[in-house]
Image (tube, rainbow, N blue to C red):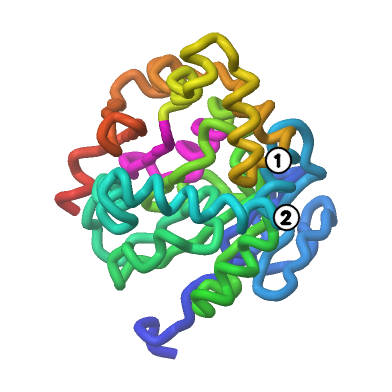
Amino acid sequence: MNPAVQSPPTIADLASCLDCAEPLAGAADCPRCGRPHPASSGILAACRPLLGRNAVAAAFYDGPAWAKFRPWERRFLTLVGGRVRARRQILGHLGNRPDARVLEVGIGDGENLDLLPSDWLAYGVDIARTQLEACIARFPVMSGRLAHAEAEALPFPDATFDACYTVGGFNYFADPEAALGEMRRVTRPGGVVVVADERPDLKRFGLGHLVGYPAYDAWWMRLVGLPADFVEMVHATQLDPSLILSRMSPSARRQSIWIGLGYLLVDPDPAWSQA
């Protein structure tokens, strides 16, 4: 067969065993340890039982609360310049390497896919299976390119992707530092890793926090659709993205985005945009 017309590899072709890291090479069971990695409805199962913050986040995105809250997310994007502009502030840092193979961690229902170059081959993981199903419904080409997996345990060999990125959600990963390490690991040497999210300290500027009554902020956050355990997680977050970046990749950079309401972490390579 002419390589130019071959089908792209599925995510099972690229994946490795969650337990022993043996490449699956498309097999449903690990050829070394036998651990099953079934695929159904175009989604590879590569996720251990969710615990802690990941369990809270998955329940939110898998349940009805996300649909109630999503209009507020869209209002936020409108405030910072609109969906396309807000997301291109981030995706533009992935560079312009032709025919790139990229991984989105926390792909959700695929909000960023239509903003990627048409010749790129996109794959995605998420802890919310319903969001992966919604992604395939919106973009049928993603069937076979998605995995139910955690950012802290990406089911791929080292250097599988040309770039890896995540937009939103990083603040509430169970272990953001481990997730960043995994993103770096599965990205080729010199490839770009990009992380973007809202400032984790935005809660401090809520009216309730400013007047010394944070319970008010918790009340209105529940009112707009966030479950109580998710609100509690938001208020408990003490993340310092700059500190994580300085430990993980001192040569990387951080910059402000979304009119100062968000941040961007970029672990770049000058050759990426020149390749």
Image point 19% across, 39% down: which residue?
A: 270
Q: Position of residue 93 (x, y in %)?
A: 26, 45
Q: CA distance from mark 2 to mark 1?
A: 10 Å
Q: Is residue 113 toward the left or the right of residue 99 in the image?
A: right
Q: Nearer the viewer, residue 169 or 81?
A: 81
Considering only vertical position in the picture, is 253 above or below 148?
Answer: above
Image point 64% across, 59% down: which residue?
A: 147
Residue 151, quarter of the rendered image: top right
Q: Nearer the viewer, residue 178 or 157?
A: 178
Q: Secondary structure at mark 1?
A: loop
Among the two numbered marks 2 and 1 on one chain, the one whose residue lies closer to the N terminus:
2
**What type of secondary structure mainly makes up the magenta span?**
strand
Q: What label sits on residue 164 in the rendered view?
A: none
Image point 44% across, 63% down: which residue?
A: 122
- The residue sitting at the top extreme is 212
Which mark's residue is nearer the viewer, 2 or 1? 1
Q: Position of residue 39 (x, y in %)?
A: 73, 69
Pointers 2 and 1 in contact (C-beta within 8 Å) = yes
Residue extent of the magenta highlight: 179-198
Q: How many marks?
A: 2
Image point 84% across, 56% down: which residue?
A: 34
Q: What's the residue type where badge 2 is placed?
A: Gly
**Residue identified by numbered label 1:** 227
Q: Position of residue 212 (x, y in %)?
A: 55, 9
Considering only vertical position in the picture, is 124 above or below 203?
Answer: below
Q: Secondary structure at mark 2?
A: loop
Q: What label sits on residue 63 in the rendered view?
A: 2
The reply to whether the magenta stretch includes residue 190 is yes
Residue 5, quarter of the rendered image: bottom left
The quarter of the image holding the N terminus is bottom left
Q: What's the residue type where badge 1 is placed?
A: Pro
